[in-house]
Image (cartoon, rainbow, N blue to C red):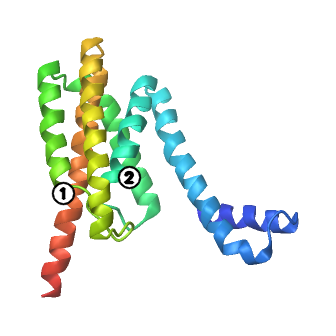
Amino acid sequence: MLETISRKITEHLIRRKIIQPQEYDLYVYSVNSLLGNLLNIVTPLVLGACLKRELLAVVLLIVLIPLRSMIGGFHLQSALLCFIISNLIAAGCMLLPDLVILPWKASLAVVTAVGILIGITAPVDCINKPMTMEEKQKMKPRIWIWLVSVMVITGVSAWCGQVKVYNEVVWIVCYAYATLLMELVNKRIKRESRK
């Protein structure tokens, strides 16, 4: 669907002589990426508004987008299925703090422990984002800086009495680590099936 919209927008830009016909493929790709990113940002915000969890939707985006883009992880074959599952998980991350409330010390301990596991394991490349060893080494310090930032967000939200916020961060970090583990298992299964 986004591909079709991207093609129509690009064709319109060519008809209006805003871009050259030889730039067609580049603009289809670029517009498609832009629309996909906008959709992935707007949808959790709309979901948060519908669930009356606007702050948690913003926290989700602030914590998860940089984390997932740096650490890598599992990707589904279908963009539509990935979109649906990701937003169901986003809704879960926003709703779970009402159902499972951890004390702030436990939340900080979980975020720290899982953060350390992510820091040791990440980044994990996948078919959608292959990485050289040099790229992985460059990414490692950024991951650790972001993980420390997430721990600070957890601590500050606990200090400010934002129970739902620091509990949501726990779920987001666990979700991010789960995608890492899923990609590692996926790679292992593929490697074993080739033997």
The relative height of residue 169 versus residue 104 in the rendered view (above or below) is below
Residue type at tag 1: Leu
Task: Give the quadrant of the C terminus.
Answer: bottom left
Q: Judging from the image, what secondary structure is the residue with disc 1 in?
A: helix
- Quarter occupied by residue 57: top left
Seen in the image, is 138 located left or right of residue 35? left
- Please report the residue visible at 31 percent of the width from the left and 40 percent of the height from the top: 146
Seen in the image, is 49 located left or right of residue 150? right
Looking at the picture, how far across and down is residue 25, in whole percent?
Answer: 66, 74
Looking at the picture, how far across and down is residue 193, in whole percent?
Answer: 15, 82
Looking at the picture, how far across and down is residue 168, in whole percent?
Answer: 28, 30
Q: Which residue is mark 1?
A: 181
Which residue ends up furthest to the right in the rendered image? 16
Which residue ends up furthest to the bottom in the rendered image? 195
**Which sits in the foreground, 1 or 193?**
193
Residue type at tag 2: Ser
Q: Which residue is mark 2?
A: 69
